Amino acid sequence: MAQAEITGHFIGGKPDMGGSRKLERFDPATGEQMGYVALADETTVNAAVDSSKNAYQDWRVVEPAKRAVILRRFCELVNVHGDELCQLITREHGKTLLDSQGELQRGIENIEYATGIAEHLKGEHSKAVGPDIDSWSELLPLGVVVGITPFNFPVMVPMWMFPLAVACGNAFILKPSEKVPTAGYRLAELFSEAGLPDGVFNVVQGDQETAGSLMQHPDIKAASFVGSTPVARSIYKASGDTGKRVQALGGAKNHAVVLPDADVESATNAIMGAAYGSCGQRCMALSVVVSVGDETADAVAEVLNKKVSELNIGPGVDNLDMGPLNSAPQRDRIVDLIQEGVDQGATILVDGRRHASYQQPGFYLGGTLFDHVQPGMSIYDEEIFGPVLCLVRAKTANDAMRIINDSQYGNGTCIFTRDGYSARTYANEVEAGMVGINVPLPVPVANHSFGGWKDSRFGDLAAYGPDGIRFYTRRKTITERWTSAPDDKGIDFAFPGSRSSG
Ligand code: NAD
């Protein structure tokens, strides 16, 4: 793609600049303006849907094994262009290049899973469900489906969706976050280069208004959404009226529990990476640590205090511990929340506003650490989505579990312990969709599925893996009868059962 000042849409295999609205974008590492993103209006959305509808008619009947050949070529191209994609992620998002590489790798795993589509769509067959009668179920595509994605994983979250959706025979429209539009566009170019027919994967850039037009469009059959909880909830609610199938993954407040028998040094190292990596802008980021017993809590606080004070922060390309936050308004909101934490009585051990990087151009903020945090404080109740970690003290493991299970969110959680029984009890009883045992970021691999509980997910099916296949397909069950002689049984008014004589 030419380094256009405006990042546009990719529709029907071609660049498209449709729409007069555009949004200014800023480089998180310098704060300087770095171009615009086009914001699709209804006309552009309609054009993209028409293109997808046309493409779907041919694509749905392409044999799964042939779809897989194109996916494998696409996977190769993504690998070949991996460095370029990571540079794009880091430039627009702000995260370190190493973090972008991790993101890309987890995205690629989802393309690899989608290349097994012939196996995934095998269906189910039952022989002899009645006299001379066999029955089988097929998983068929839905039609045109849309993905609306957040800013924090410009490549990985779209890859949770479109490779599998397309592999299942759907046409897919991606609406990336307006804050990170370019990587999605580049992926569409690479998929096209791999041989994907025009219109099977379109990219429409835009904001809330664009997303609204997509969600209202009657020819879009399903929507995968990943973003904040209020938007996820509203999209899920609206799906009842629009008749679309929806999976809507929302925000999170992920807790780690440290039991008294845990190794504090290794637990705090793991917590540091999961809390402050990507500047805390991950839906699986640890934002609360619940230590069991005052002795454990004091030890954890002391070690974390030192480690957080030593965080190195700078531009993502320098690969220090943390890059900048993605935007100025986001940083301002986090700074306000830090002040609320102080005003509401939490003990601030490390104040990110005092870090030297906070005074530099760009959207930098140091790591912040609070102790003696309690439910009811804004820093505990709200998703901060920044480099702020809250330490909560619990008397017993049961108290820790109760605190976590009372939380509004239920995305991920983890426990640090050397005791198998405690870990097992935790995994059994904790109210969260993804649980780590001595694993700080328990993001499921591509052949499982990703999804939280409670206000972290709306919709029955989780993202990618087996749930992804189910989400992007509809089941058709065929029952057929072939007999050697003409049927001379006459009319039977009774409801047919599998044990009837035929
Ligand atoms: P966001 O909700 O502001 O935006 C997400 C997407 O929705 C963007 O494409 C945006 O343009 C669009 N959008 C915004 N308002 C909308 C509206 N009213 N109607 C329709 N579409 C709308 O989220 P964000 O700030 O980009 O991302 C951060 C959030 O995403 C955090 O809350 C984080 O926890 C969450 N997240 C969740 C997961 C998960 O798997 N559960 C993964 C990544 C991020």
Image: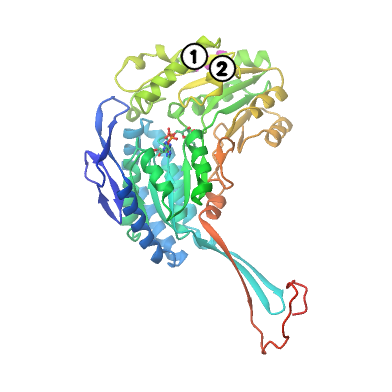
| Whether residue 137 can be seen here | yes
Give the image location of residue 346, x and y in percent.
Answer: 55, 12
For mark 2, what is the residue? Answer: 377
Could you tell whether 134 is left or right of 193 in the image?
right
Label 1 vs 2, first from the N-terminus = 1
Indicate the amino acid at tag 1.
Glu
Q: In the image, ligand 1 is in what quadrant?
A: top left
Q: Quadrant of the C terminus?
A: bottom right
Q: Decide whether residue 306 is among the magenta residues.
A: yes
Q: Closest to the observer: 195 or 486?
A: 486
Q: Is mark 2 within 8 Å of ligand 1?
A: no
Looking at the picture, the colour scheme in use is: rainbow
Residue drawn at (59%, 17%) of the image: 300
Q: Which residues are magenta?
A: 302-307
**Eyeballing the image, is 122 above or below 384?**
below
Q: Closest to the observer: 237 or 57?
A: 237
Residue drawn at (72%, 85%) of the image: 490
Residues at circles 1 and 2 in contact by the CB criterion of under 8 Å: yes
| Whether residue 81 can be seen here | no
Q: Toward which corner of the image does residue 361 lie, by quadrant?
A: top left
Secondary element at image label 1: helix
| Secondary structure predominantly adopted by residues drawn in magenta | helix
Q: Toward which corner of the image does residue 82 lie, by quadrant?
A: top left
Secondary element at image label 2: loop
How many numbered badges does the structure rendering display?
A: 2
For mark 1, what is the residue? Answer: 340
Cα–Cα span, label 1 and label 2: 8 Å
Give the image location of residue 499, x and y in percent.
Answer: 78, 73
Q: Residues within 10 Å of mark 2 (few under 14, many from 20)?
A: some
